[in-house]
Amino acid sequence: MKSDTCSAVATADSTKIPKVGFVSLGCPKNLTDSELILTQLSAEGYQTAKSFEGADLVIVNTCGFIDEAVKESLDTIGEALAVNGKVIVTGCLGAKTIAGSAHGTSAASQNDSENLVKHLHPSVLAVTGPQATQAVMDAVHQHLPKPHDPFIDLVPGAFGEAGLKLTPRHYAYLKISEGCNHRCTFCIIPSMRGDLVSRPIGDVLNDARALFEGGVKELLVISQDTSAYGVDVKYRTGFWDGKPVKTRMLDLVQALGDLAEPYGAWVRLHYVYPYPSVDGVIPLMATGKVLPYLDVPLQHSHPDVLKRMKRPASGERNLERILQWRAQCPEIVIRSTFIAGFPGETEAEFQHLLDFMQEAQIDRAGCFAYSPVEGAVANGIDGMLPAEVREERRAASWRSRSRCRSSASSAGSARRCRFWSTRRPRWVAGAGPVEVMPMRRRSMVLCDCWRRRRQARRSRSGISPVPGSLTRRDMTLSPSLYKRAKKTKAAAIAAAFIKKSAAIAADFINQPTWCPGRDSNPHDVTR
């Protein structure tokens, strides 16, 4: 009897499905790395846990770009260790080291002492850098052996080429390369992710087709530098579906546009620098082949500031090229990010930035105060501004969010600048991050919309268009009846207004977050 019980317990333990908790932090590039890891975990029979308590171990994909992101990653690691105790760390923060902190005697202890995560959280099971799917899986296999299922282990590609996705079904990120060849003084991403490495164009297009077949309606192309795709392989010719395709941004965008058309989907380009090679993509946007939208991380406009930043273009050419894009494709929407209070920035240089945003007709802009990043060259530049001045200039960019000049072909319709704060985005269940209109602005929109509709209805019926005015019939009543009629009419108008406003608000809030005129992730401040 006792032996039967023991064998039953052993069988239950052997058939227990291991559960892994997962936390993904940082930019969309990190998110795609998380999707690869989760796909591999699922393919090997692991399950994901909804909480730290219910997991056998926890994987934290970290971000190490700015100080706030580093703090958030370290806090998340500490929380997972306190609740679960078994944590594997991956991502950009895993590649950060502490300079001059190595005092160990052996090579292993020296590496552990230099690693920032190991130094602050020595109890973590393993630490890897970004895009290290196999290293993460090796650590998982070591501390949580995978279950064996003879019916699943022999089935190849059970989860499809696209794998598991952390985004809602209607949109997905497509990473085309890793790393960056630029050495911007405020950025440490190349030290963590390395130089540019372009993915084979055949693999990229295969992933895109799998996503479209899975129901994706918006494909967001991401990388550290999308416009430099293929530079590292000298635009080598690859093959897809038996046809030669060059590893180049223009050819990739053309192929993605052709691939998306039968599925009724569209392609959105992110992190595009204003290179001359991008000019060839604009006609594709004008013809509707791809979405007329470009995410161009300009960061500043003044040539001297750009020189101190070591950005890959000059301010004068940027403005000239953007105006040229608008002439070729008047419907184009340009989103950009800017840094206010960069070391050495003068009042004149900051005013140049504000004027540039207006002249370039930037449709969506995010302006952030300069944040010193450990290891960045910009920290050693003379003229570091006080934190109060940096924050004041960021706030000044918010106050300058007036209407931009209308484009020549927009028939006088003004473009409205949209600014985003550095706060976290609000998340809607199953819908991803959305821009939430302030309540006061929303009320103004609703009031204006209802007022216009009411005036149009009164005009069609021959009634005075003045809102809340009494008809001629009401004026013939006695004073007491007139007051009662006026009060009754006011109450009816108020009730109708509240009812109509609620309906309009519901339509406004429930609109799709992936419509062409909106940014799927406006709060991404990387690059």
Image (tube, rainbow, N blue to C red):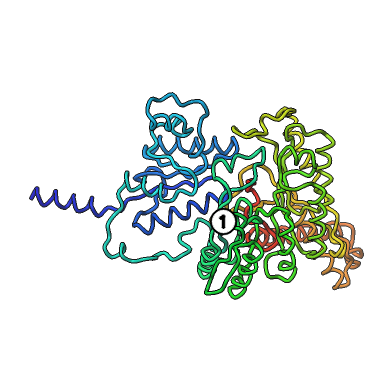
Could you tell me which residue is drawn at 64 percent across and 65 percent down?
Answer: 253
Could you tell me which residue is drawn at 57 percent across and 47 percent down?
Answer: 195
The answer to which image quadrant residue 121 occupies is top left
Q: Name the residue nearer the viewer: 526 or 519.
A: 526
The answer to which image quadrant residue 47 occupies is bottom left
Work out which residue is located at the far left of the displayed protein and give it: 1
In the rendered view, does 320 fall on the left or right side of 159?
A: right
**Above-or-below relation of 189 to 494:** above
Q: Residue 451 placed where, x, y %?
A: 81, 60
Q: Name the residue nearer the viewer: 426 or 271.
A: 271
User: Can residue 266 be spotted in the picture?
Assistant: yes
Kind of residue at disc 1: Ser
Q: Residue 452 placed where, x, y %?
A: 82, 63
Q: Residue 396 placed where, x, y %?
A: 78, 38
The answer to which image quadrant residue 398 occupies is top right
Task: Kindly identify which residue carries mark 1.
Answer: 198
Check disc 1 and report its element: helix, strand or loop: strand
Q: Name the residue nearer the viewer: 370 or 484.
A: 370
**Above-or-below relation of 395 to 275:** above
In the rendered view, does 230 fall on the left or right side of 411?
A: left
